[in-house]
């Protein structure tokens, strides 16, 4: 018994003959072709006239079958194709090779154009005689439009890339050879396309970068992570360096095969320079307050001592001379401090010189005198060797003293106790040569070129106790160069001492002399009807000299050298005025103020902050914290007198506090 599922034709259905079977297949095929709507499929006779027309042809070309059958197929072509005989050419080619394929514009019934893919196949009878053509047409307008948009987009991008001058944008082959080159690359790197295309991109790197394989390493990272970004020095065609930001992106095709790399390079040299300037400016701002404090603090006792001696009526001529010398030195030092605190002058070297003819022997004498206390404290000898004849230069006496004093201070600071420091001046036909030598720790060879750089301190980590501000040698170099000279350093290495050499042009005439330095101290009895004044300062010289000066002005003054001791003295002494240094260890001036205000007995005491910090925010903070006044060291005598008068006036006016005698 036959399975019905395997016999879809009923048993009683009569079998078809071969001819009938072929007719059925032809009918099915014609029906299939006729119903296709996505493709125009039709027949042409040997002359090119339409013989059949399917639903796809009507949909794509717009003609109904009765409108087009019998018409020549050339009506589907635009005028330019007709003018060059393209329809006939297609038929000839199809007859010659059996098949012809083309893509181009075709015309619909309504006259609109569409982009068509056309395949024409020659048809022959069994004898090989041509009997017509089968033509298949597909509407590819949407694909064509998309391809055109893509092409236009790529063209716009190419033109954009080519015209960019601020960025070097180029392609690399997978092995790193340059494959394309835009105008920005020409501008930044200096190569023309014909000079660089085909060359390996490692030519843009410094020798030391190539030695460690940096170019290959960047390509490897781009392959691993998709892209790599770096900033560093790169090399132009002329050998000059520029600071570059570089992005390398790995490029792959649709199959995942590496096709190369896209590389974008920006020249950030100007930004790098501005960042360095900004960083330098930031460093200046950070140490500016410390600089002011550290430089003004030593001036305070000097100014106070001068004030004491100026109030002493019975000074000997020698002491009076010393007082005047100190006064002159204080004025000069104050001027130097003001110059050093001018950030613009420090960073730009715009320091005005007050030039005159200067005797270098006097510069040496004053510099040695200034550094003598430090050298004596360290039991160091200073050997001076000067030429027999006088040597003069055109320059600023104070600035030249500053240079030599700075070099002597360094020599003393970095030399052992009991060591020797040498100063020698030689006279040349056009220059004078001044050397400062020591037997100290010396300078490592790698630091000889950097010790004159702003803030560079070779010994910061080796010996923190000798830390300074890192500007001394930089100022020396700037000042020497402003005088038309030069300064250099020599050393055989660590532990071998140092020699600093200053060369200055000689002057044509001789004149001028420099002031000397000295010190002195006096005391006076406390007169009757005096205010009680307490000075609290961890700098003993500053505290003692200010207390002495206030005593000379007719008041009873005491000094304390730290915050805790100052509070003990205040409770016993009950001062009418307290002057407090702000920057004290353990207990700073603000903590002292709070403790004073917490004591009911001292609640109405007038308080004044003393500090080397004199910027507006420093003054504002002192007043906000509760101080009645803010004094900058060295204290100006007129301001001190005004403070004393104001304190006494306030007590007399309010009737509070300890009754004045």
Image (cartoon, rainbow, N blue to C red):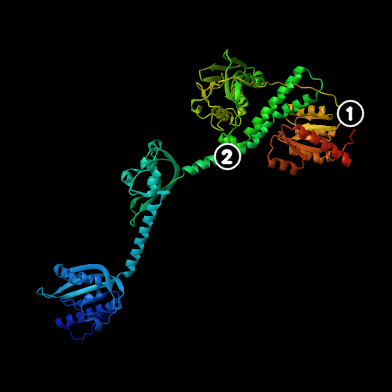
Which residue in the structure is indicated by mark 1?
A: 528
In this rendering, the answer to whether 549 lies above or below 652 is above
- Residue 318 vs residue 91: left or right? right
**Residue 236 point in image, percent of width and height:** 39, 41
Q: Quadrant of the N terminus?
A: bottom left
Q: Label 2's element?
A: helix
Q: Is residue 17 visible?
A: no
Among the 4 quarters of the image, the one containing residue 286? top right
Q: Is 33 situated above or below 271?
A: below
Residue 620 point in image, percent of width and height? 72, 43
Q: Looking at this view, name the residue that lies furthest to the top.
A: 388
Q: Is residue 33 in view?
A: yes
Q: Which residue corresponds to the image point at 68% horizontal and 31% vertical from the top-left?
A: 296
Task: Give coordinates of residue 208: x percent, y percent.
Answer: 40, 35
Q: Is residue 249 above or below residue 324?
A: below
Q: Name the residue rendered at 35%, 65% in the picture.
A: 146
Residue 143 in picture, x, y percent from top left: 33, 67
Query: Dot 2, crowdedness within 10 Å: few (<14), some or many (≥20)?
Result: some
Left or right: residue 476 compared with residue 227: right
627 up-or-down from 399: above or below: below
N-term-proximal mark, 2 vs 1: 2
| Residue 344, quarter of the rendered image | top right
CA–CA distance in space, label 2 to label 1: 54 Å
As helix, strand or loop, the secondary structure at mark 1 comes to loop
């Amino acid at each position: 018994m036959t399975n019905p599922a395997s016999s879809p034709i009923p048993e009683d259905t009569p079998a078809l003959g071969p001819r009938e079977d072929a007719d059925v297949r032809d009918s099915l095929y014609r029906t299939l072709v006729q119903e296709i709507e996505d493709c125009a499929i039709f027949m042409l006779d040997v002359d090119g006239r339409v013989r059949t027309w399917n639903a796809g042809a009507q949909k794509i070309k717009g003609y109904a079958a009765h409108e087009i059958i019998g018409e020549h197929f050339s009506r589907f072509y635009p005028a330019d194709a007709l003018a060059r005989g393209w329809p006939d050419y297609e038929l000839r080619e199809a007859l010659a090779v059996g098949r012809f394929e083309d893509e181009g514009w075709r015309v619909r019934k309504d006259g609109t154009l569409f982009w068509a893919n056309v395949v024409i196949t020659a048809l022959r009878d069994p004898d090989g005689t041509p009997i017509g053509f089968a033509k298949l047409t597909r509407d590819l307008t949407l694909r064509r439009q998309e391809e055109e948009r893509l092409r236009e987009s790529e063209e716009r991008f190419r033109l954009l890339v080519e015209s960019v001058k601020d960025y070097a944008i180029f392609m690399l082959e997978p092995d790193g050879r340059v494959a394309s080159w835009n105008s920005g690359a020409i501008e930044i790197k200096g190569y023309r396309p014909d000079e660089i295309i085909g060359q390996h991109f490692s030519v843009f790197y410094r020798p030391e970068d190539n030695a460690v394989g940096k170019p290959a390493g960047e390509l490897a990272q781009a392959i691993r992570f998709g892209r790599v970004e770096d900033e560093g020095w790169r090399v132009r065609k002329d050998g000059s360096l520029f600071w570059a930001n570089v992005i390398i992106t790995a490029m792959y095709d649709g199959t995942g095969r590496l096709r190369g790399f896209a590389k974008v390079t920006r020249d950030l040299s100007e930004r790098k320079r501005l960042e360095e300037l900004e960083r330098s400016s930031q460093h200046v701002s950070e140490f500016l307050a410390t600089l002011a404090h550290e430089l003004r603090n030593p001036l305070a006792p000097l100014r106070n001592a001068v004030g004491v001696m100026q109030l002493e009526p019975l000074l000997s001529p020698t002491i009076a001379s010393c007082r005047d010398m100190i006064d002159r030195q204080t004025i000069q030092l104050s001027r130097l401090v003001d110059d050093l605190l001018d950030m613009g002058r420090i960073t730009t070297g715009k320091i005005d010189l007050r030039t005159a003819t200067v005797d270098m022997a006097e510069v040496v004498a004053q510099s040695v005198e200034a550094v003598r206390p430090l050298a004596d404290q360290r039991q160091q000898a200073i050997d001076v060797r000067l030429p027999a004849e006088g040597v003069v230069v055109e320059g600023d006496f104070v600035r030249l003293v500053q240079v030599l004093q700075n070099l002597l201070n360094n020599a003393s600071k970095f030399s052992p106790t009991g060591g020797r420091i040498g100063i020698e001046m030689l006279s040349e036909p056009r220059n004078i040569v001044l050397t400062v030598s020591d037997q100290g720790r010396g300078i490592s060879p790698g630091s000889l070129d950097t010790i004159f750089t702003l803030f560079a301190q070779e010994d910061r980590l080796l010996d923190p106790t000798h830390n300074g501000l890192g500007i001394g040698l930089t100022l020396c170099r700037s000042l020497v160069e402003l005088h038309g000279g030069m300064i250099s350093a020599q050393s055989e290495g660590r532990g071998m001492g140092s020699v600093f050499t200053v060369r200055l042009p000689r002057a044509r005439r001789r004149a001028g002399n420099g002031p000397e330095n000295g010190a002195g101290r006096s005391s006076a009895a406390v007169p009757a009807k005096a205010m009680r004044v307490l000075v609290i300062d961890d700098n003993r010289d500053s505290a003692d000299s200010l207390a002495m000066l206030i005593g000379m002005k007719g008041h009873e003054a005491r000094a304390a050298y730290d915050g805790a001791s100052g509070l003990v003295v205040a409770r016993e002494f009950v001062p009418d005025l307290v002057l407090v240094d702000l920057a004290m260890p353990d207990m700073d001036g603000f903590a002292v103020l709070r403790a004073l205000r917490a004591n009911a007995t001292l609640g109405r005491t007038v308080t004044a902050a003393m500090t080397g910090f004199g910027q507006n925010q420093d003054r504002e903070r002192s007043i906000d914290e509760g101080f009645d006044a803010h004094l900058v060291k060295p204290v100006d005598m007129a301001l001190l007198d005004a403070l004393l008068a104001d304190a006494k006036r306030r007590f007399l006016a309010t009737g509070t506090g300890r009754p004045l005698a």
